[in-house]
Amino acid sequence: MKKQKALRRDRVNRALESVFDYPLTVIEAPIGYGKTTAVREFLALNNCPVLWLSFLPGEDTASFFWDRLSEEIGKQDEGAGAKLRGLGFPADAPQLATVLSIIGEVDFKQNTVLVLDDFHLSKDPAIGAFIIQIAKEQPDNLGVLIVTRDTSTLDITELLAKGLCNILPQQILRFTDDEVRAYSVLMGYRLTDSELKQLCAYTDGWISMVYLTLLGLGQGIPVGRQDAVSDLIEKALYNAYDADIRRFLLWLSAMDTFTAQQAAFVTQEARAEEFLKKLRLENAFIVKDEATGVYKIHSVLLDFLRAMQKDEGEKKALWRRLGEWHLSRGARLPAYGDFCRAGDVERLLSLLNDPESIAYNSTYFEGFLELFKSIPHETLIRHPFAYLQFIDTLLTDGDPADAQDGAARLNEFEAAIAGAPDMAPDFKNRILGEIHTTRIFTVFNDPKRMVAHTQEALRLLDGGVSYIMMQQNEFTFGSPHFLYTYYREQGALKQTAQYMAAEFPCFPRLASGCGTGCDYLTMAEYALETGDWHEAELNARKTIVKAKTKGQTGIIICACFTLMRLFIRLGKTAEALTLLRRLRDAVARENSVFYNTSMELVEGYIYACLGRPESIPEWISSGDMSPAHFMYEGIAFNYIVHGKAVLLSRDYVRLEMLTEEFASYFSVFHNQLGFLHNKIFEAVAKYWLYGMEKGLAALNDALDMAREDHIVLPFAEYGPDLLDMMREIDYAHPGDAYVKEVFAACEAYSQNLKNAPQSALSLSPREREILTLASDGLKRDEIAARLHVSASTVKTHLQHIYQKLEVGGKAAAIKKAQ
């Protein structure tokens, strides 16, 4: 098919020039139309700097895409590539903003094109959504070109409406009759007019079909005698090789890409390299990347070969050897996935049962849950550590049915181990200790029972650490408020905090440091809620120092959140926002979906307290919780933040209706602080909808809920909405010291908000001018020319604009400024 390069048409090149006019160009056509060839030729002809990413059938994950994208951008800007690689694929809005900012700062050469080839193989919708965001951001000198068979997984409606995207249909790639004639000559066939007409009618300008049909003519197969592409491939291409090469091709189809060495290992064919050279020279459907030495079989042929491979035993043997190949190179998760496809249960169980190979993400491979659910209990019990990882996943994957199944399996497993007569005592204790470790998840939110299982695990392990629970585990379960999660009984806040501070440090001893700093954190959060500002700050800072020694990001998020809320209460808004920006950057580097969700909850809460609804993450404002990642959605802290956002919108009817819904969410784990915030929401809504009397009734209920625990700060954070009612309550109860303290806190908080500087939203005249020009579609160098300054000066101004507006890129800055 290389010969078709000589027949690239001017009309195709003219159509592809749209890549220079639109942030996103999509070339859409079915398999075999020469999309990739046309794009490569066009870009080479125009000497365009290219970032090329090809999707593969078995490598459609966001992580694979991200590794390739970071590598390609690193060729243009090494520092930016390293930053992107360290961040990982953006799992949510904060990370996306950081990533877009990094890409936006890259000085791409003129007419640089990011090509995403075979994009239809990308099954992860997050990848498509990310590409859409890049197009919206419109980085200077960077155009995106998607090569795909269909656009059904790519939501480009908005881009099309805004004129930011152009779709090139398959019609531009069809070969004309004259081009088919010329191509036939290049292939060594001189057709009569009648034969040419028949060939063009049969193939409809589809170059792959032209190629295969001509091969068939060479073997005496008339045009039109083939019933389908697969039939033509079999007769004109596959059957042209001897039995050894045909068998080799079938074996190769177990892999999406491969090196000669890998092919030899997996197929066990001694002549693999010889066969590959022959196939590459004689077959346009097998190509080699000279830079990497990686071979790829064209999808047309690959689909045919996989359909031809009927021997299930042989396929499993190939996948098994592919797994061993990956394992020998340290690619543990791909190896596990291969063994899973091969159905090699024993190999997989033996690996996952080996304490030396157990890792935090050992079960993060495709097919894990489905396979393990099909394995008999007796087999799983013989591999206790593998089984416990499976049970752990069932308990925490968010599916209630799985959690119930996991708890039942754990009970059955413990009974089987406890009753095993011939098991060595030390080994039995090890397994029972790990079972008690796993049981912590079954009694989540009950501090005493969690501690009891932890202490029993430590006893059984004789002070040793768990194989299953590790330092990298998420200790706060995604909540930015640790004490909130365990405060489940009205009047018991102090008792709960003291118990947790004294007893929870047993968790880090069991889990290699996971949870380090939770003791000081608990006391910091208790002090904050009850108005002891000095203790709150001191213990929060101690928490951060201690948690950093073991990399406990979840604990650090909670401690920083405590400090931010404290700073706003004390009128130190600038300090709160500075800490928020620093924490956002630190969390982005972790690339954990749970930490990112926690971070967005922190941002939403803080911006709600400051009265900045435009800065609250969209999913929180709207109440669409689907973008979030919770280990236990029943924690429901997200509904407190959502309620705050609705309150800021002044939609009191909606707020009142939501309080009824929120109560059921807080009931799951009896979150008393959730109930308290909800009652405050109810008081504000009733005040505005029905008047002072109704509002006071609800607010008095809230004060009664909080009085015994002496909770103060939540009321203060709604100060501007509660002042009128608190004034009435204070007047009616002149001797109530608790009411006076809450009223004073509401007044102080409201006054601090009035005095808070608004400079974060204030742009200089020059910054406004630059942002206006950027919103008109001008690039950095065009803005620089218009204003008679350097492009680097414009870049610096844009960075200052993003910082002031607290956004990650140009599109977000324009939207927020508007």
Image (tube, helix red, strand yellow):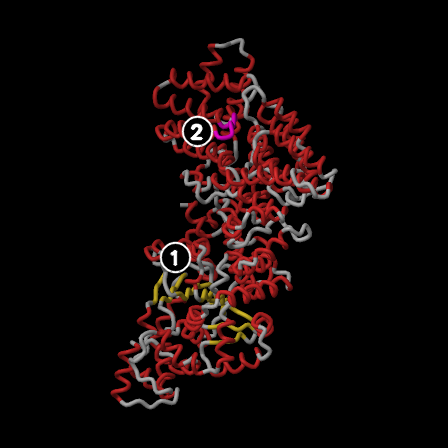
Kindly identify which residue carries mark 2. 664
- The N terminus is located in which quarter? bottom left
- The C terminus is located in which quarter? top left
- Find out whether residue 670 is within the magenta segment: yes
Q: Nearer the viewer, mark 2 or mark 1?
A: 2
Task: Rate crowding at label 1 as few (under 14), some (14 to 19) or many (20 or more) other CA atoms within 10 Å.
Answer: some
Which residue shows up at 44% across the image and 43% down it?
626
x%, y% of residue 135? 42, 57
- C-alpha distance separating marks 2 and 1: 36 Å
Furthest residue in direction top, as rendered: 735
Answer above or below: position of 199 versus 751.
below
Answer above or below: position of 559 versus 139.
above
- Dot 1 lies on which element? loop
User: The disc labelled 1 sits on which kind of residue?
Assistant: Thr
x%, y% of residue 161? 32, 55
Span shown in magenta? 668-674
x%, y% of residue 770? 45, 53
Answer above or below: position of 535 versus 591.
above
Closer to the camera in the image, 105 or 267: 267
Closer to the camera in the image, 87 or 342: 342
Kindly identify which residue carries mark 1. 153
| Residues at marks 2 and 1 touching, judged by CB atoms closer than 8 Å | no
Which residue shows up at 63% across the image and 39% down it?
435
Number of numbered callouts drawn:
2
- Dot 2 lies on which element? helix
Q: Please indicate whether residue 768 sits to the left or right of residue 539 in the image.
A: left
- Find out whether residue 452 is within the magenta segment: no
Can I make out residue 217 in this image?
A: yes
